[in-house]
Image: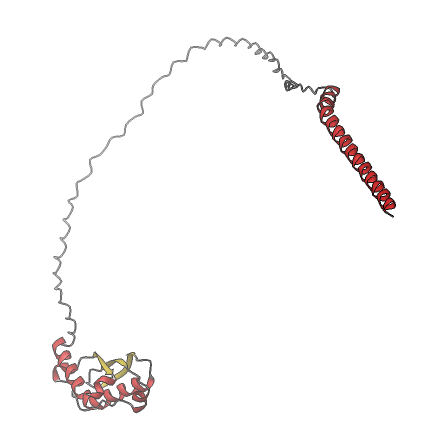
Amino acid sequence: MYGGAGLAGARFAGLAGRQLRLLALALLASLALHLMVLYALPMLKEAARMALPPLTAHLAKPKPPPEPPRVEPPSPQPLPRPAARAPRPAPASAAPPAPVLAVEPAQPAIESAPVVPVAPRPSAAPTQAVRAEPAPAAAAGPDPGSVARFRLELMDIARRYKRYPRIAQDNNWEGRVELRIAFAESGAMSSLAVKKGTGHAVLDEEAQAMIRRAQAQASVPPSLRGKAFTLDIPVDFFLRDEGN
């Protein structure tokens, strides 16, 4: 029994030793092959370099541009010779002029005519001086001082009739109305217009109504009678003034 086990062990040992030897041989062969490749690689590169012909590049010289064709100028043509002038004929000898006899005409006798005296012309009548009449003086305009005083009087009376519309107070509408009032020569108001409004019709209309009520109480002074004039009156509508 022990002899069979020893025999199997010997066989296994021999097989393992053989495999190790084969492995070592394979490693040696691989190493030798690599060494041969490394040694032969530079030789192969040198042989390949020597086998390829060297490349040589030559620069070609540029061809000169073709010369433009020469244009020969046309040969000058000979000028035509002027024709020979015909000789002028010699002037014929002029015959001597015949003598001219001067004949004096007979002068008639001039009788002296009687001298008639010329009457002197009557002198023109002296012009009468035209008397220039002075132009009528232009009608003088209204006195500025009287216009200013009447304006202040009308504005003072108009303040008594000023009413701030309720709808304007509720909507916080404010502004200044500029009115232009024209008076005729008779002293009556001829026109009343809004020169600049507030943008709210209710305020503009109330300002005109206030001036109409005040104009009936203000009379035009005698110094302004017979002369037309205009007044510009402002009317203010502000809520701060109403609270005072």
Query: How many callouts does the rendering have?
Result: 0
Q: Please give the name of the residue rendered at 24% of the width and 82% of the height, measured from the top-left corner.
A: 236
| Foreground pick, 138 / 208 | 208
The colouring scheme, among rainbow, by chain, secondary structure or one colour, is secondary structure
Image coordinates for residue 134, horizontal then vertical, percent: 13, 67
Q: Nearer the viewer, residue 56 or 17?
A: 17
In this picture, is 223 found above or below 2?
below
Residue 142 horizontal/vertical position (percent): 15, 77
Q: Quadrant of the C terminus?
A: bottom left
**Front-most of residues 101 and 83:** 83
Residue drawn where x is 21% and y is 91% of the image: 161
Q: Position of residue 29 (x, y in %)?
A: 78, 30
Side (left or right) of 7 relative to 103: right
Of 60 and 97, which appears nearest the observer? 60
Q: Position of residue 41 (x, y in %)?
A: 72, 25
Q: Which residue is at 20% across, 38% downward?
A: 113
**What residue is shown at x 21% (from left), y 88% (from top)?**
243
Position of 225 relative to 5 (above/below): below
Vertical order, 230 against 217 (above or below)? above
Q: Quadrant of residue 217?
A: bottom left
